Amino acid sequence: MNEKHGFARAHTNIALLKYWGKINSDLILPANDSISLTLDKFYTDTEVTFSDEYTSNLFYLNHQLIDVKKMQRINRVLEAVKSEFGYQGFAKIESENHVPTAAGLASSASGMAALAGAAVSALGSHTDLTNLSRLARLGSGSASRSVFGGIVHWHRGYDHQSSFAEQIVSEDQIDLNMVTIVIDRRQKKVKSTLGMQHTASTSPFYPAWVEATNQAIPEMISAVQNNDFTKIGELAEHSAAMMHATTLSSKPAFTYFAPETIQAIKLVEQLRESGIECYYTIDAGPNVKVLCQSKNITRVKRFFASYFDQDQLVVAKPGSGIKFTKN
Ligand code: DP6
């Protein structure tokens, strides 16, 4: 039996300037550039074994075999990797998500980046991280950014070759942390893929979203390069607010916000007014993520602990890029 093994660990990321909408959904080419922070706490470990003996791809997530119907994107990443290395067998994928059960965070970014990394490392060399970012993108857009640590910029590009992410500032050079307020642990009702598609095709505000985000990109790049927390926070909060305004202006309109989401937004504003600088960001779900500097983590956590349970609060710091060994 001819087997080839590969392993990768990738961390998830939170977008500071969000990706929301595609110009090509087969290649996952986004309408706008995006910028994210890779997080230390949440990651996926994935092992890929290719073998001539397998007759189909098998995917185990947290030791449970996943239905083939849910493997479309996984197969797409594997096909792309196989065709790059001229390999024809099938793969067994064993993936484990290390996201605290209470975190309520999406795992497709770390999952698809780890899958691409493990598959590439099984079949060939994984040294070309730019190419790995392109391959991860085929699984999930935000996964293109999870290949790198620290602050990452995904260039939207116009074809497979030109759409990839790169690191702008490494994890040890940025003081930016995230306290997640977990409002709902369940899977989101409108998945990001569908939510962004519906928004892009029906919201009259959508073109303005794309333009405003692309304009904010150079401002965010200089803010992170200067470790300018105020500017980073203001731009990130505005990006989240704009993204959620596009869902409210789509037809039919929808929102990811729960009542507690608004409550948490108001509390962030209140805390900021009291002199503890912090900003919110929100993805395609009700959970609110609070951005703050290291010196304020304890104070931010303590403040929110008087409104939410301790286990609803999860702290994350800047995380590293993809790794090909467990330690
Ligand atoms: C709101 O990367 O999950 O988190 O490419 O369709 O898999 P697909 O979408 P996905 O969307 C992420 C949307 C977001 C913003 C962001 O991460 O930039």
Image: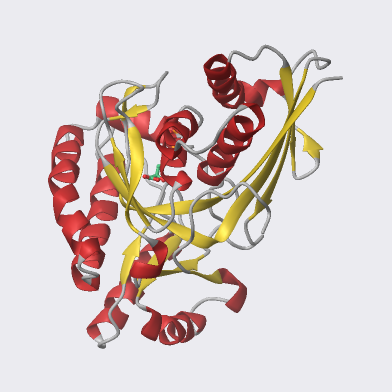
Left or right, 13 with respect to 254, comes to right
Image quadrant of ligand 1?
A: top left
Residue 255 rendering spot, x and y as whole percentages: 37, 46
Left/right placement of residue 128 relative to residue 262 reads: right
Q: Residue at x 26, y 61 (%)?
A: 237
Could you say where residue 147 lies in the image, as x and y percent from the top left? Answer: 47, 45
| Of residues 38 and 321, the one drawn nearer to the viewer in this rendering | 321
Residue 258: x percent and y percent?
44, 56
For this view, does 71 lie left or right of residue 245?
A: right
Q: Which color scheme did the rendering employ for the protein? A: secondary structure
Q: Is residue 310 visible?
A: yes
The quadrant in which the N terminus is found is: top right
Q: Toward the viewer: 169 or 290?
A: 169
Relative height, residue 163 to residue 231 (above, below): above
Q: How many marks?
A: 0
Picture quarter containing residue 7?
A: top right
How far from the left and from the top, in percent, is residue 227?
Answer: 24, 70
